[in-house]
Every structure is written in structure tokens, then in C-alpha cells.
Amino acid sequence: MLKTAEQSVAAKTDDVGRIRGDFPILQREVRGKPLVYLDNAATTQKPSQVIEALTRYYVSQNANIHRGVYHLSELATAAYEEARGRAQLFLNAAHPEEVVFVRGTTEAINLVASSYGRSVLRHGDEVLISAMEHHSNIVPWQLLCDSTGARLRVAPIDRTGTLLLDEFEQAIGPRTKVVALVHVSNSLGTINPIEELVSVAKERGAVVLVDGAQAAPHMPVDVQRLGCDFYAISGHKMYGPTGIGLLYGRSELLEAMPPYQGGGEMIRSVTFEKTTYAPAPGKFEAGTPHIAGAVGLGAAIDYIERIGWSYIHEQETALLEHALEQLAGVPGLRIVGCAKERASVVSFVMDGIHAHDIGTIVDQEGVAIRTGHHCTQPVMDFFHLPATARASFAFYNTLSEVDILVRALKEAREVFG
Amino acid sequence: MVELRELYQQIILDHNRSPRNFRAIEDPDRVAHGDNPLCGDKIKVYVKLNGDVIEDVSFDGSGCAISQSSASLMTTAVVGKTVAEADELFDKFHAMVTTGVDQAAHRQELGKLAAFAGVREFPARVKCANLAWHTLHAALGGESEPISTE
């Protein structure tokens, strides 16, 4: 039976209400007003399912992993490796060994820059990034270039916040060893045509790393289809705990790479004369890892899959469209970044009101948005802006929360005249 | 919106819209840079001294309403004062926006600067109000490293 438009709106309202019930923090108030959390690109809130998985682990399974012969250690090891298996399926990696647990996207990129980069790059080689990268996909490569004598090149963007494809292609030269690109921009919301970019870079013989921190929470990622060599994500941006993330690396590369950090867990045998290393991913997981974090991330992946990509896409698209439409009605407001393909992230500035003042004013209404350079200072410089305000949405946000933001912005306009 | 009006008082909004002494001094005796990396506020403070007296003081740069108006009001408050008097005023201002304890006792000396008393209710914004003062302090002390609130 066909649903009427009204019925489907009502059904959606029920859905989002039920989903919001999963997130305890969304029930709290801020400054006497219901919390309107619109800083999801910085970090997402956690559903009870994730919080309970962490508690369950500490209450009934906590032990150090891999070397214990006792039952509890076996349980903890199984829980940790099971989470790796779930991450493998989530990214569609060919093998679980291709998934390395790290602290987050930043550590994942540093791992690749320092292990792969230092062993492969020579003086005069090149690393190519784009002009819309987060600092975490700029600075590790600068450090690498400083220590190897390699050169960092930057593919430009246009005024809409879209990567210029011809210029990108031209920037890949015979000495380009690594291409590191963001999948979805955290400050502009641009979704890069990553499959196409990876394929161009791979044809030219470069190794490709994709910063997927802002993509993984919003769309299915298939690393085999993308054809990238490395893919980095953060658990806390996809409803999981802080301090845990994933690095996908193609087997052949991980096996050939030297260790990142030395210590326990990452060795096969140690003598004072010579140490041999464990195979990947153990080689890259020195020390006791964030076991509970991995378990929590596994629960977050389960949660996302239960909600389903089609619902996530539908709700986040509705939020983005509503926000763009409503924000256009705020006097003196200008949206920064208008790429054709974009995620549910809106950066904006207001005439005569600094982003920081906007942030303080909407906070009085319980609205949490981010203000500043969003760890993308080169993007701010490109648009000649010191800072922007940014609202970023998750599937648990509602259209009326967008309206609360817009009302608060109109109040800011009144305060500042 | 009561608290907000306390933060964004008319005098603060006025000095944000039309900052006083917003210019470079051609041949300053002292200059210092300050920045607030969190929000990207950048400021440069110029000072012309006559002996120990601040004969002229100005600033340029960009930032939020709190940092811009604080810089503007600071220049109007310290011009004509000695270096020691300016530093003393900074101490009182600093105490007012961080703890508030000295506010009542020093209302007289603080004058228009008392408009920033509301800032202490907004901990994230205290450094915005202090940026210009820290930078002036550095300029008067002859420090050459850029001043940062981080």
C-alpha cells in the first residue's frame, strides 16, 4: 500500500524519536534548554548500545589480550579480534589482517607517513595532497618531507570548494610516490569523487591514502572498490569511543613496511642482538591496545548497520537541504563551500559578526556548533576568512533542531544590529 | 538573552563596529604581535612613548567582538598613563574578567572597562578579552616573541 506524504513524515518522526532514545546525552539540557548538538563532524554522541558494550567489557571480560592462557584473557582476545572482523566487513577489506587498530585518523596517517613514507621516499620525491586537507593530513607529510628531502605538492580547489580534477592530474608527476586525499572535507562538506581520484593516482603509480574520518559515518566505504592502498578512520566520529580508530592497509604494503612503534605485542622474538617482528597487523600495534575501545567501535559498527545506510542518507540529506534553505533566510549570512556533492556539513559566516561571537550566542539557546578554522587553516586562507561557524548533522538530528539554530542566528543578528 | 546582553553590552558592540585607534603608528617605540589560535584572532599593538608615558597607542588586526572592542577600549584607557599605571590597570582588568573579586573595589579606575565584567561568565571567551592587554604588556616589556593566549 502506498503511504501518503503525511504518513511517511509521521513515520519518519517516529523513527528519529526512537533513534534519539538510544542516545542518553540527547535527553539533557544545556543552559536550561534542550541540547541541540550540531557538532557531529568534531565528534558524534554515543548510543547506549556502545556505552553498554564498554561497560560489559569492563564488567565481565577485562584482561590483557593475546598472551594469557586463562579464560578471561581468551574472552578479551576474542572480543578484540571479533571487533577487527567487524571492521573488516565494514570496510570490505579482503582480510582481517589488513585492519590495524590505531588511536584515530591522525595516528593512522602518522603511521603511514612514518613507516611507509620513511622507508620509501627519497630526496626529490613528491607527496601530493589537496588544498582542502585537515591539518592531520598535512603535517605528518610535512614532517616526512622535512626528514627525507621530499617535496609536498598541493592540488588546488575552486571557490565552490571542489577539487580541480585537471590540476590534480597534472600535479601527479613521475616522482609522486604518495597521494593523500580527504574523502569528505570536514570544513566545506565537499565529497570528493574519490574512486576516480584514486584510479588516476594509481594509474600513475602512486600509493594512495584516503582520510575517511568524515566519510565513514555517512556512507558505505568499500576499500576494494575504491582501490586505495590505505584508508584511515576515527571511531569517535562514527558513534564509537574516543581513542580508537582504524587503518586499512593493503596486505602487501603492510607486510613490507617497517614497524611504527616498538614494544610488546608487535614482536615475534626479542634478543639483545636481534628482534623479529610479528606479522601485520600486530607489527603496528605495539603495547596494550585500547581493547575496550575496539569492542566499543565494533558495537558502533553494529549500530550503524542496524540503522542502515538508506535511513542515514535520507535523514542527513533532509537535514542538509532544510538547513541550506533556512540559513539562506538569515540576513547577512553567507555559506562557505557549495560543492555539488556534499555531506551534511554547513560552514558559514555572517556580516559583522565573528564566528566566535556566533558560537557564544547560539550556545545560550543550547545549540552546540563549532567555530574557528576547523583544523583547516589553509582552507580559511583560501577563502580569506579568519574563521567560520559550522553546523554538522547526524541522523539523530531533527529538522526542528535546524529551526532552533536558525532562530538563534536571527537573534545574533538582532544583538549585533 | 539576559546574560548575552550582559556580555555584548552596547559599548562593546559600539567599539567592535567602530574601533578607536585602529591604525598603525608610523614610527612606534614598541610593537608586539598577539594571536589567539583557537579562534584565529590576530592583533598588533603599537606604542609611542614619551619618557615613561604612553603618548600614543594603537592596534590593528582582526578578531571577534570581544577581542576587538577590548583592544579599542584598552587604547582609550591607557593613553596618557605611565607604563607602571598601564600594567596596574591590566592587573585589575585581568582580575575582573577572571575572578571578578576586584571589580567592585576598582570600578572607579576601571571606568568603561567594567563593561567586560560579564566575560567571566563565559570562560571560553576570557582569552579574547585579555589578548590585547597581554600584547600591550609584551610591547611595553619589549618582548619580541609573538604573544599567544594558548
Image (cartoon, grey):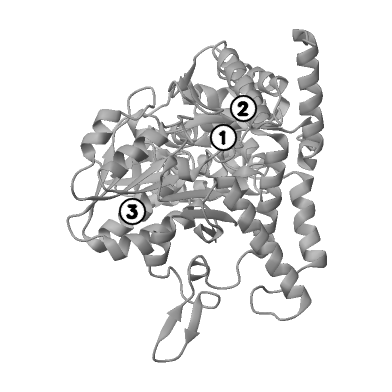
Query: Gap between marks 1 and 3, in whole Å?
Result: 27 Å
Location of the N terminus of chain A by quadrant is top right
- Left or right: A44 in relation to A187: right
Q: Secondary structure at mark 2?
A: helix
Q: Nearer the viewer, residue A193 or A180?
A: A193
The tag on residue A219 is 1
- Name the residue tied to disc 2: A313
Quadrant of the rendered image containing residue A288: bottom right
Q: Nearer the viewer, residue A224 or B52?
A: A224
- Of circles 1 and 3, which is in front? 1
Q: Position of residue B59 (x, y in %)?
A: 36, 35
Q: Are marks 1 and 2 on the same chain?
A: yes
Q: Is residue A241 above or below residue A22?
A: below
- Name the residue tied to disc 3: A141
Q: Secondary structure at mark 3?
A: helix
Quadrant of the rendered image containing residue B114: top right
Q: Secondary structure at mark 1?
A: loop
Residue lying at the far bottom in this picture: please name it.
Answer: A272
Which mark sits nearer the N-terminus, 1 or 2? 1
- Left or right: A204 in relation to A283: left
Amino acid bearing label 2: His
Amino acid bearing label 1: Met
Contact between marks 1 and 2 (CB within 8 A): the answer is yes
Q: Nearer the viewer, residue A193 or B112?
A: A193
Q: Report if residue B131 is visible in the image.
A: yes
